[in-house]
Image (tube, grey):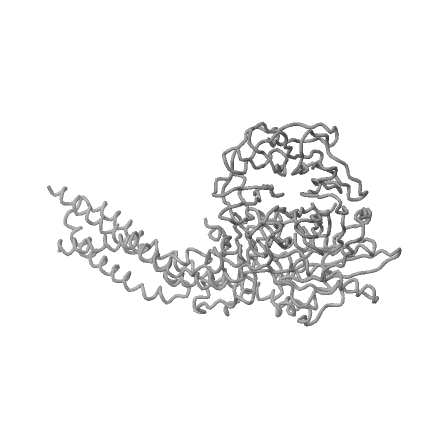
Amino acid sequence: MRSSFLMSLVLHVTVVLLSVIGLPYLQRSPAKENIPMVVELVSIGSETNLPAQPYQKPKPKIKEAKPPKPLPPKPETKVVLKQKIPEPKPTVKRDLKPKPVAKPKRKLKQVAPKKLAKITPRRKPTPPDPFALVLKNLEKEIKTTQMAKKPKKKNKSKKSDFEQQIAKVLTRRPISESSSSRITMTEMHAMINTIRTAIMPCWNLQPGAKGAQNIVVIIGASLNPDGRVTRAWVKNRSVLIEDPFKLAAAETAQRAILNQACQPFKLDPKKYDIWKDVTLNFNPSEMFGR
Amino acid sequence: MNRKVTVRKNLITRLKSVFLGFIVLVPLNFLTFQSALGELRVDITRGTVKPLPIAVTNFIGETQQEIESGQSISGVIRANLERSGLFQAIDNQAFIDVERTLDTVPQFQNWRILNAQALVQGQVTLISNNRMRVQFRLWDVFAQQQMIGQVYTTIGTNWRRISHIVADAIYKRVTGEEGYFDSRIVYIAETGSLMRRIKRLAIMDQDGENHHFLTDGSSLVLTPRFSPNRQEITYMSYHGKVPRVYIFNIDTGRQEVLGDFPGMTFAPRFSPDGNTVIMSMAKDGNTEIYIMDLRTRQAKRLTRHSAIDTSPHYSPNGKYIVFNSDRSGTQQIYIMNAKGKKVKRISFGKGRYATPVWSPRGDLIAFTKMAGGKFYIGVIGVDGKGERLLADGFLVESPTWSPNGRVIMFFREIPKGKLGDKETKIYSIDLTGRNEREIVTPMEASDPAWSPLIP
């Protein structure tokens, strides 16, 4: 009995160690292999020899023999006035088709919390159960310390409980895997790579701008079950809006996610609960060799 | 004894309970970790560098004159944006249904089909006294919202300048950087054979239009430079047999020699506030850097070294000066403060460095490099790091920055068939080393200098 208990103990410790230390490591390496190759780098050396593209414009005719004249002053430069034009009034928007697009967004948004609300209570009660059992057992054991004979009988019954609980835990795995909201690390990495690979060709960078490598844009996006983006918004807009270049970088990232040419994302519809809302971090530092 | 046994059993029971807890919790956590993470997070660390597809519609108008003006304005805007290399103008022939008013929101689906990511619409209205009103809207096609909308009023003959201003506004809104289309180029127009070369000062818009000669070619002129805030150019001329630095007023055509120096003065440049000219003076085999206050006409020597110190240029904030010197044995780039102190070398690559020019953004210095029998145009950080070579050739020289510090213009000498014969042209190149383009001029051209944005 003792030897089997020890064996069981060793095995369990191994399982715990594997799950805590070993498994994350084992699952990280294949994910790195899936990262796609560089699409385009801003490399100076290779670009400098690009053939010149002459600006195709007819040469202005200038009389060479004509003596130089001082240029006439340009008072008209001061004449220029500048005013801002507001966007057209909303009455015009009735003609637009994008409006019906906006409605499903709201529906999706409303559905999302409901589903989560259903899922969370299911999960939450499960973890406290084993702890409650452990605490109850401890209390009972403390009470029975003065009576030596009685605990022996109880121990026997607990041993059977212990084995049953282990059996229950082992049988839970297939149930949890069947849920659409639970995926393995491999599946998650595949999902991330699918979205990343699709968006990269549509993310059009401005590498020549000052400090371009330091601007990180966070975009939130809602997706339809068919893998198309219904809505995208800049999450860290308040940080970026003060600087025109940062704002432009944010809008560039937003355009990348909204670009229909890079959609739909080929994702498993069964896992829609996982990818219906996505957060994308656009960080160009790697393209600048950082 | 019994008590010991009891404690031991209790310990075993507790251990069991703890392990039971682990066994139950660890797999559960592992299997459901994804749900606990919430939203899926994706890191995008790579993208592409492509021009932005933009649709620039012909600006609408009611009369024939307005329609023609609208087409001309749209054409200039389209050409400016395309020439920057950051935009790809979609062919007007491909447009499906162009809106005939500015007061409605465009049918974005018609523009998405063409893969247009930005849309420009405009209107020209001729008003009294030969004046015109030009208004435009820039739309984000994917986000379906207006990015900018402005209206300008000016005289009719000023349509080309309005076009540049509109193009600048679009460029700034999309890229976040200031535009550079409403600017001019002064350069040396060259004609004649190698032995009888005629060099004249010439000026034109950055797109090559509105070309004019400023001098008649009777004297050799070199290294023209714009004033940052006045319609003035400083340059070197061989007028009167002694090469000297002159100042030329573009509006009045008046020119005057700058200072009465005992030696040859050359390589002049304005300070950022336009009140000082910094230049080199060669005397008795030594070249030093001087400044001259344009208000008091007082000159002051900045460097004191037996080596040749030349090609000075102020930083945008006016606190530092970059120049080249052979004090270390070969021509290298140095930085010093505006008083001529704290000299520090920043170039350490192979070859010789010349004509350093500080970027208007302040982060980079453009230079000419000579190495391995070739010339290069390159940029380097103000700390001497990150040297990059952008263009090369048999002879490339004299870099000048666009007002926004994004584009560099330079000239290139291309050897021709006969011995010693050559052709000189001006080119522009993006800071990234992309989009090299020839700037077409009526004759051969060298020594370009980019003006600031026209006030």
Q: Toward which corner of the image does residue A274 lie, by quadrant?
A: bottom left
As drawn, the residue found furthest toward the right would be B129
In this rendering, would B134 be left or right of B265? right
> Left or right: B155 with respect to B431?
right
Which image quadrant: the N terminus of chain A?
bottom left
Q: Image height check: is B277 above or below A186?
A: above
Taking B415 as reference, is B242 left or right? right
Q: How many marks?
A: 0
Q: Is residue B376 visible?
A: yes
Vertical order, B90 against A64 (above or below) = below
The residue furthest left is: B1
Which percent across, then down, holds residue B306? 56, 29
Viewer-nearest residue: A36 or A152: A36
Q: Position of residue B39 (x, y in %)?
A: 47, 57
Q: Is residue B423 above or below residue B68?
A: above
Q: Position of residue A240 (x, y in %)?
A: 58, 48
Any part of residue A242 in sight: no
Front in this rendered view, residue A227 or A256:
A256
Q: Is residue B415 left or right of residue A268?
A: right
Front one among B130 and B206: B206
Q: Residue at x 71, y 58 (%)?
A: A87
The x and y percentages for residue B87 are: 62, 59
Q: Quadrant of residue A5?
A: bottom left
